[in-house]
Image (tube, helix red, strand yellow):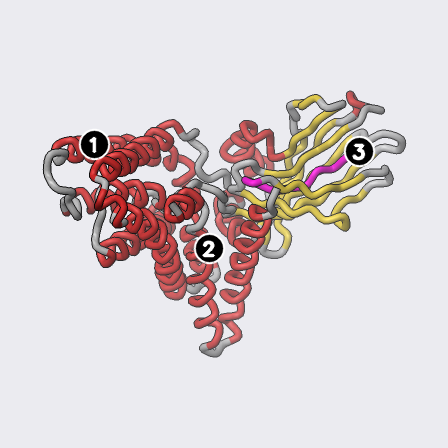
Amino acid sequence: MPPIALWFAQANQFFNAQLSTHFRSLDEGGILPIFWVLGIAFVYGVLHAIGPGHGKALVAGYFLANGEKKKEVFKIGFLIALVHASSALILTIVAYYILEKTASKILREMGGTLTQVTGGLIVLIGIWLIYEIIASKMTKPVQGGKKVQKLSVVLLAGIVPCPGVMTIAFFAITIGHIMLGVFAALAMSIGMGVTISIAGLFANNFQQSSFLKRHFKWLMIVRMLGAFIVIGLGILLLMTPSVTKPF
Amino acid sequence: MRWIVLLVLFINASWAHPHTFIDVFLNITGEKSAQKIEIIWLFDEMTSASLLTDFDANKNGQFEKEEIADFKKTVFDDLKKFSYYTHLKVAGKAIKIEPKSLDLSQERNRLAITFKIDLEPFANQKKTIGFWDEVLMCAFELEKDHIHTFLRYTLKEVSNAYYYGYLLEL
């Protein structure tokens, strides 16, 4: 077996530990640690989003069903990352300062339900995609879905808060560097946006390939496949056991 | 074609991503055969920050009975479905473990939890204990330096496509 899992986990661990070390060295003064924290947060974001979740499968499925312009793919990828990170950031801050709880406690209590609700809605999006594909069968392949649909994809892919961002934001609060915590979360979300967009781009390039442009039947099959990936993902989330975050 | 391969590779949830990093320490007692194993999990600083805030309710840097009970109820008992990330096999057969004497402590900025497993019922049988999380939400690290025992043992790294961990043979 390839030691990819090991390598990947160690890389995550390395950046995680680096991040806490550099956060702590902020108190020694100087501007350098700030850049270190932001830089590491960005790379950590790229790596972090390679793992499952973070909306990649949903994005890929969606772009298989509905091809888009490249610019639009990046827009959606980065928006998802932004929603994913800011929902975590907002939850952490609201939980700590208003509810006087930790965000991880709230996610332990509610994360399962939230995931299931999201899963149900994702299934509905998939059904909507299928309906559109069937409805458009007799016409030329369309490029680009409706705005509402894209917005729903962004929200559903990102709304379950990113536990990675939560951990960092909370850590920043406990050591008294909340502002930098916010910027680190943003840097991390830009990193995640890169990864999510690349996933979307793979799917989109395939959907827009010249082969599929020439073979209409295959294009329909690929679009249907995309819609089924979306539905499958929704069902998977619906059935996920409640533990999304053991600690 | 190459797009399909890349696509599948990329979105097919190939690697989980750990959020929690745990250093494992083991104290194994017994002279001829292992009697008891004490397992200590030392959490990474970031995870510790929120766990310490959540469970050291009175913020005195120590864990009283009620605080430990709260941790057990809200976090630890839920780990049963992951067999507490501690996979015991006796003579090749998987055994469900029942951790005892759960304890929590703070080591500098990190949280440590300790629990014990009784191995006496399995005296003189070949035992293996695996330390890993199959969904890799947590990454475990176990070094030889962290194992304290007079017994003979072997420690192997286990690396699968989806997760990795360590296998201790006693």
User: In which chain is the residue bearing label 2?
Assistant: A
Neighbourhood count class around disc 3 (C-alpha, 10 Å): few under 14, some 14–19, many 20 upward: some
Q: Secondary structure at mark 3?
A: loop
Report the amino acid beneath label 1: Ile
Whether residue B155 is visible, yes or no, is yes
Report the amino acid beneath label 3: Leu
Left or right for B85, reference A179:
right
Where does label 1 land, which residue?
A: A130
**Which stretch appears magenta?**
B161-170
Whether residue B58 is visible, yes or no, is no
Position of A25 relative to A82 (above/below): below
In the rendered image, which quarter is residue B150 located in? Answer: top right
Q: Are marks 2 and 1 in contact (CB under 8 Å)?
A: no
Neighbourhood count class around disc 1 (C-alpha, 10 Å): few under 14, some 14–19, many 20 upward: many
Nearer the camera: disc 3 or disc 1: 1
User: In which chain is the residue bearing label 3?
Assistant: B
User: In which chain is the residue bearing label 1?
Assistant: A
Report the amino acid beneath label 2: Leu
Where does label 3 land, which residue?
A: B170
Quadrant housing the N terminus of chain A: top right
Mark 2 vs mark 1, CA separation in Å? 33 Å
Say which of A23 and A121 sits in front.
A121
